[in-house]
Amino acid sequence: MSAFINPPERIPFYLKIGIWFAEKIAGKEMLPARLLAWYPKAAIGSGVLESLTAHGRDDAEKRLLRLVRLQAAFELACPFCVDMNAFEFEKHGVSTEEFTALQTSFQTGFPPTFSLREKTALEYARLISATPLVFPNDLMKKLKSQFSERETVMLAATASQVNYWARLVQSLGTPPVGFSHNCDLPNNFQEE
């Protein structure tokens, strides 16, 4: 499976440097970065957005943000985003059972291993990734009671960033890169 378009043959030198760093860190060719080279402003803006991603200060916050990224990726049915965010999910304290549960949580509910705080954040991420955007008052009250304003912005920004990438990579036909070699993607994410 390949993208809808090919990367440009000539990439501006200043983008080559950023792409080189991204690929060095990822250990894989980053097709989205190469495709964005067709419009350097989009490449730079996307690079800045990615470089400012919230990662969390402690293990609990890192786990929470990973869960939010995964929930948004599954909600958006974005193979590239699932692949990217599933990478080493275990290192962020997410079990295989929890990972699997995120794929179907809209049908089955969240497993008991998720804290109330995590469930609230995941529901918020799901709503951020849905169309139309609707935020019920009861969820917003729970969110305000469990998260500070700063944390709420981090959750919203994290889920929204996945939304940005999902829309961008899916509209360019970007296939998964192969980060999630140690987890199975659901059948609807497999190549046809």
Image (cartoon, helix red, strand yellow):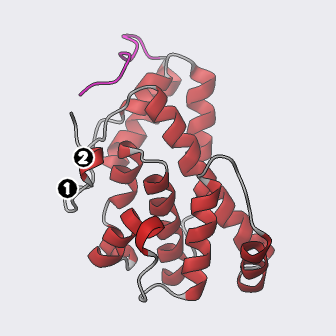
| Image quadrant in which you'd find residue 189 | top left
Q: For the point 52% across and 75% down, which residue is it?
A: 64
Q: Position of residue 154 (x, y in %)?
A: 67, 65
Residue drawn where x is 59% and y is 62% of the image: 125
Q: Amino acid at mark 1?
A: His
Taking the magenta stretch, the answer to whether it contains residue 7 is yes
> How many neighbours does mark 2 have within 10 angstroms: few (below 14), some (14-19), or many (20 or more)?
few
Counting labels gives: 2
Residue 52 visible here: no
Q: Regarding mark 2 in the picture, which secondary structure is present there?
A: loop
Q: What residue is pinned by disc 1?
A: 181
- Distance between mark 2 and mark 1 Cα atoms: 6 Å
The numbered mark at residue 178 is 2
Dominant SS of magenta comes to loop
Circle 1 crowding by C-alpha within 10 Å: few under 14, some 14–19, many from 20: few
Instruction: Give the percent coordinates (x, y) of residue 179.
Output: 27, 51
Q: Is residue 25 magenta?
A: no
Q: Give the position of the N terminus as an image quadrant.
A: top left
Q: Position of residue 140 (x, y in %)?
A: 76, 73
- Which residue is pictured at 40% across the width and 13% down the height? 8
Can residue 15 be seen in this snapshot? yes
The residues colored magenta run 1-11
